Image (cartoon, helix red, strand yellow):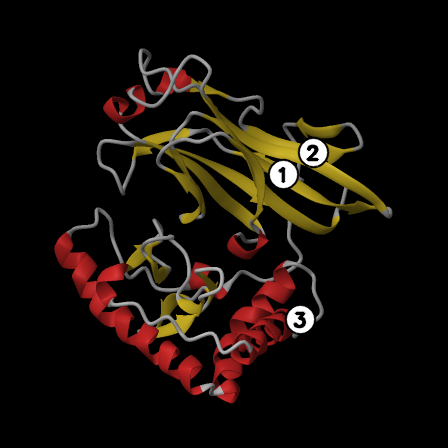
């Protein structure tokens, strides 16, 4: 069965379970306190046609023990949605179910409905099949967490079927290796902080032509990922920016000490964001609501050059 315009999602169903959820080394959702949540996150912009991996990162048992209870739940699934013969379809095509019971071994905390191997997609659902060509799920690997050496990463391969080329950042340089320490953090930040300043200068000067040029390649990839007409994402961004300028919201140039650098676990993406909120590279301050309207900026590196990519 072929799905037209397939859209992949991470579905997270959580209750009292601190976690980090990732796809291809990119953080999708994080909650160090473990609040209850049931949500879906689109991931087409982070995956390739073919093999990918999704991960659930858990803290060490001492941390978990203080935050979990008998009703805790930690479920991560991969969904695919789209159309088949003009009918809307939705299938679960992979999962990692985690029971945060600190009294059993890490491996014993895993529950999964989908076994390893090849899969076929039909009207009856996503079914395990020795000769299936529509999908694949790998064994759940239990590995040390590269960010938290005391934590554990549960990672699983899955196969996606997408009608577009591999994203450039997935082929970019690996410029960072975990574990992170003060030395390698500061060394990378010295390279990225000037890129943030350059962007702030452009937005403060309202250099629209250059802003469009810089953000156009990234925006086209988003158009492709979500099956939009080329130019849609950039047009939406520029419309929002025009609104900020009309409202005369000032650019919020925070001191470096109040910004935070985040590096993907894959070592291929880096951003600097507002440390207080965990989001926003380019921020416009609205004093009436005491909040920032913002754009994100994430860089990859290819052939030694930093490129805005997400």
Q: Nearer the viewer, residue 131 or 141?
A: 141
**Residue 239, percent from left and from top:** 62, 75
Q: Is residue 190 visible?
A: yes
Q: How much space separates mark 3 and mark 1, taking CA atoms? A: 25 Å
Q: Residues within 10 Å of mark 2 (few under 14, many from 20)?
A: some
**Residue 252, percent from left and from top:** 37, 70
Question: Is disc 2 placed on a helix, strand or loop?
Answer: strand
Question: Is disc 3 placed on a helix, strand or loop?
Answer: helix
What's the residue at 44%, 48% (across, down)?
Answer: 24
Residue 270 found in image quarter = bottom left
What's the residue at 80%, 32% (across, down)?
Answer: 123
Q: Residues within 10 Å of mark 1 (few under 14, many from 20)?
A: many
Dot placed on the residue nearer the N-terminal end, 3 or 1: 1
Residue 81 found in image quarter = top right
Determine which of the numbered discs, if any, sits on residue 79 in the image.
1
Determine which of the numbered discs, if any, sits on residue 120 in the image.
2
Q: Nearer the viewer, residue 46 or 130?
A: 46
Q: How much space separates mark 3 and mark 2, taking CA atoms? A: 34 Å
**Residue 222, percent from left and from top:** 59, 64
Dot placed on the residue nearer the N-terminal end, 3 or 2: 2
Q: Is residue 127 left or right of residue 74?
A: right
Q: How much space separates mark 2 and mark 1, taking CA atoms? A: 15 Å
Q: Residues within 10 Å of mark 3 (few under 14, many from 20)?
A: few
**Residue 148, percent from left and from top:** 25, 38
Residue corresponding to mark 3: 232
Compared to residue 207, the image places residue 282 above or below, namely above
């Amino acid at each position: 069965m072929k799905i037209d315009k397939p859209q992949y999602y991470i579905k997270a169903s959580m209750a009292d379970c601190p976690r980090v959820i990732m796809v291809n080394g990119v953080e999708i959702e994080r909650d160090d306190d473990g609040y209850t949540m049931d949500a879906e996150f689109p991931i087409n912009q982070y995956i390739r046609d073919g093999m990918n991996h999704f991960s659930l990162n858990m803290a060490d048992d001492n941390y978990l023990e203080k935050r979990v209870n008998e009703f805790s739940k930690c479920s991560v699934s991969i969904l695919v949605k789209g159309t088949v013969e003009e009918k809307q379809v939705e299938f679960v095509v992979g999962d990692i179910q985690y029971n945060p019971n600190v009294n059993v071994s890490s491996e014993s905390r895993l529950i999964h409905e989908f076994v390893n191997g090849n899969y076929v997609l039909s009207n009856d659902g996503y079914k395990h099949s020795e000769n299936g060509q529509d999908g694949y799920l790998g064994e759940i690997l239990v590995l040390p967490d590269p960010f938290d050496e005391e934590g554990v990463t549960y990672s699983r391969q899955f196969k996606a079927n997408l009608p577009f080329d591999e994203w450039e950042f997935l082929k970019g340089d690996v410029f960072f290796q975990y574990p992170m320490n003060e030395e390698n953090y500061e060394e990378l930040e010295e390279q990225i902080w000037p890129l943030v300043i350059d962007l702030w200068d452009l937005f403060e000067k309202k250099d629209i032509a250059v802003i469009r040029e810089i953000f156009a390649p990234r925006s086209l990839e988003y158009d492709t990922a979500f099956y939009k007409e080329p130019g849609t994402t950039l047009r939406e961004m520029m419309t929002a920016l025009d609104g900020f300028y009309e409202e005369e919201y000032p650019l919020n140039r925070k001191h470096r000490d109040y910004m935070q650098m985040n590096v993907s676990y894959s070592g291929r993406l880096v951003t600097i964001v507002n440390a207080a909120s965990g989001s926003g590279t380019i921020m416009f301050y609205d004093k009436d609501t005491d909040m920032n309207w913002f754009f994100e900026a994430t860089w990859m590196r290819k052939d030694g050059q930093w490129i805005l990519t997400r």
